[in-house]
Amino acid sequence: MYWVYILQNPVGTFYIGHTENLSHRLASHNDPGPTHGKFTRKNGPWDLVWSEEHPTRAAAMARERQIKAMKSANWIRENLLNGRVPTGRD
């Protein structure tokens, strides 16, 4: 199974991605080591605020692209987070 997920940092920025191992990927995003992406390393810590399971990597990638195409934090809050504004500590 694959997961599409949304992370949020303390200032409210969202990060959208997909993975086969959700817990490992979250740990990877929060690892300050130089081998991980610059954006998540410099803008964390990150908390998981939403996830959705998919049967194939292709399905997860398509859903990730769909969410990213919205280019809107408000759309994420209204449509995926049911209008709540996560604090990152929910």
Image (cartoon, grey):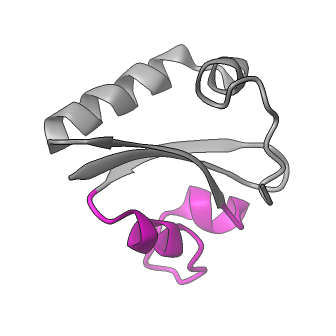
Task: Please state if 74 lies on the left or on the right of 65 as rendered.
Answer: right
**Residue 53 found in image quarter:** top left
Along the line of sight, the residue nearer the viewer: 84 or 41: 84
Please provide the residue range marked out in magenta.
20-46
Residue at x 61% of width, y 80% of height: 32
Question: Residue 63: within the magenta?
Answer: no
**Placement of 5 over or under 76, stated as above or below:** below
Percent x, y of residue 90? 78, 55
Question: Residue 29: within the magenta?
Answer: yes
Task: Please state if 65 lies on the left or on the right of 84 as rendered.
Answer: left
Percent x, y of residue 14? 65, 42
Task: Please state if 14 lies on the left or on the right of 58 as rendered.
Answer: right
**Residue 63 found in image quarter:** top left
Residue at x 44% of width, y 70% of height: 23
Residue at x 71% of width, y 67% of height: 45
Count of picture labels = 0
**Placement of 28 over or under 16, stated as above or below:** below
Percent x, y of residue 73? 69, 26
**Placement of 61 over or under 88, stated as above or below:** above
Residue at x 59% of width, y 60% of height: 40
**Residue 15 found in image quarter:** top right
**Placement of 43 over or under 5, stated as above or below:** below
Percent x, y of residue 5? 47, 46
